[in-house]
Amino acid sequence: MSLEGKVALVTGSTSGIGLAIARAFAAEGCSIMMNGLGEAAAIHKVRDTLAGETGVKIAYHGADMTKPAEIADLVAATHKTLGGVDILVNNAGIQHVDRVESFPPDKWDTIIAVNLSASFHTIRAALPEMKRRGWGRIINVASTHGLVASTHKVAYVAAKHGLIGMTKVIGIECADSGVTCNAICPGFVSTPLAIAQIETKAKADSISMEQASRLLIGEKQPQVQFTTVEQIAGFAVFLASDTASNMQGTALVSDGGWTAQ
Ligand code: NAD
């Protein structure tokens, strides 16, 4: 079955993995609702470029994923502008690295809101119509940190473990409805979110970005290389395909061997 004509809502798609996922679904002929933070002119440019490259409808809604009312409006606007949500990709995410004793409570709240609660709010709003139509795909971008822990990432690890749990619940609640819910768990992917951590390490250890990158990845991944954003986007398209129609509540991992150890 072709994905042509489906509508994909991708949260956090103004950058990194989300943008690659939006691009991949647009290339499949899906209309896209983009979302994410950033400078208006830059977002406009990305949106126009994507529309020009693919010839599909690309809309944008600037919902702040910490705000349930704005999330509800994002889903409603996707219905109104593009005719529904067939594929929902919960991708928006942020990180903060600090030991638990000094982890700022407001950072905890924001990370839990964006990386975990936002997916509850989007799914809650989009699922009834997917079930009514008898087809839908919910794809949650989790992380290896949804499966294992690292120090100094208490909020991120808690949120991503929560997201994997949510994926399982939604997956089994959607059984036999034509809707599937699955997660993707990348290890290191070269995006602003990971690059910020490499910069911090390079600065702290007075080493080059190249050295810091190899150290940071090598500490976790036997295969010392980034997964690419295009590879993650390929997973998302696969999860939306018929080949994946019997997958429910699973997590697809691409982490250079990190969690195999
Ligand atoms: P990124 O920083 O490039 O993109 C994050 C996106 O989320 C941006 O579009 C940003 O505007 C959006 N966003 C952040 N806060 C928001 C808010 N309050 N409201 C709306 N949008 C918001 O990062 P990325 O690496 O592409 O991350 C995408 C997802 O992939 C995240 O969930 C992240 O946890 C996950 N992930 C990333 C890596 C990695 O190494 N980069 C590894 C595993 C998982």
Image (cartoon, grey):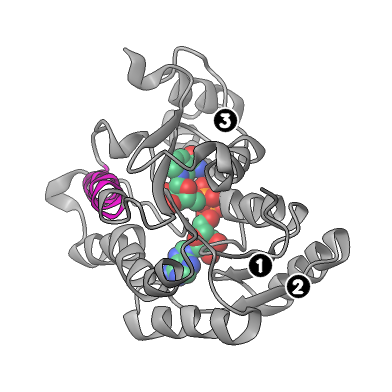
- Upstream in sequence: badge 1 or badge 3: 1
**Marks 1/3: CA distance?**
24 Å
Can residue 236 be seen in the rendering of this structure? yes
Q: Amino acid at mark 2?
A: Lys
At horizontal 53% and vertical 70% (from top left) the residue drawn is 85
Q: Are marks 2 and 3 in contact (CB under 8 Å)?
A: no
Mark closer to the observer (2, 3): 2
Q: Image quarter for residue 73? A: bottom left
**Marks 2/1: CA distance?**
6 Å
At horizontal 57% and vertical 28% (from top left) the residue drawn is 226
At horizontal 56% and vertical 79% (from top left) the residue drawn is 78
- Upstream in sequence: badge 2 or badge 1: 1
Q: Are marks 2 and 1 in contact (CB under 8 Å)?
A: yes
- 226 vs 54, left or right, is left
**Dot 1: what SS?**
strand
Q: Name the residue tied to disc 1.
A: 32
**Above-or-below relation of 220 to 53:** above
Q: Name the residue tied to disc 2.
A: 57
Task: Where is residue 187? Give x, y as percent.
Answer: 45, 31
Mark closer to the observer (1, 3): 1
Residue 67 colored magenta?
A: no
- 144 vs 151, left or right, is right
Q: Are marks 1 and 3 in contact (CB under 8 Å)?
A: no
Q: Is mark 3 within 8 Å of ligand 1?
A: yes
At horizontal 29% and vertical 55% (from top left) the residue drawn is 170
Can residue 192 be seen in the rendering of this structure? no
Q: Main secondary structure of the magenta part?
A: helix
Q: Amino acid at mark 3?
A: Thr
Q: Name the residue tied to disc 3.
A: 227
- Local packing at callout 1 (Cα closer than 10 Å; few below 14, some 14-19, many 20+) is many
**Dot 2: what SS?**
loop
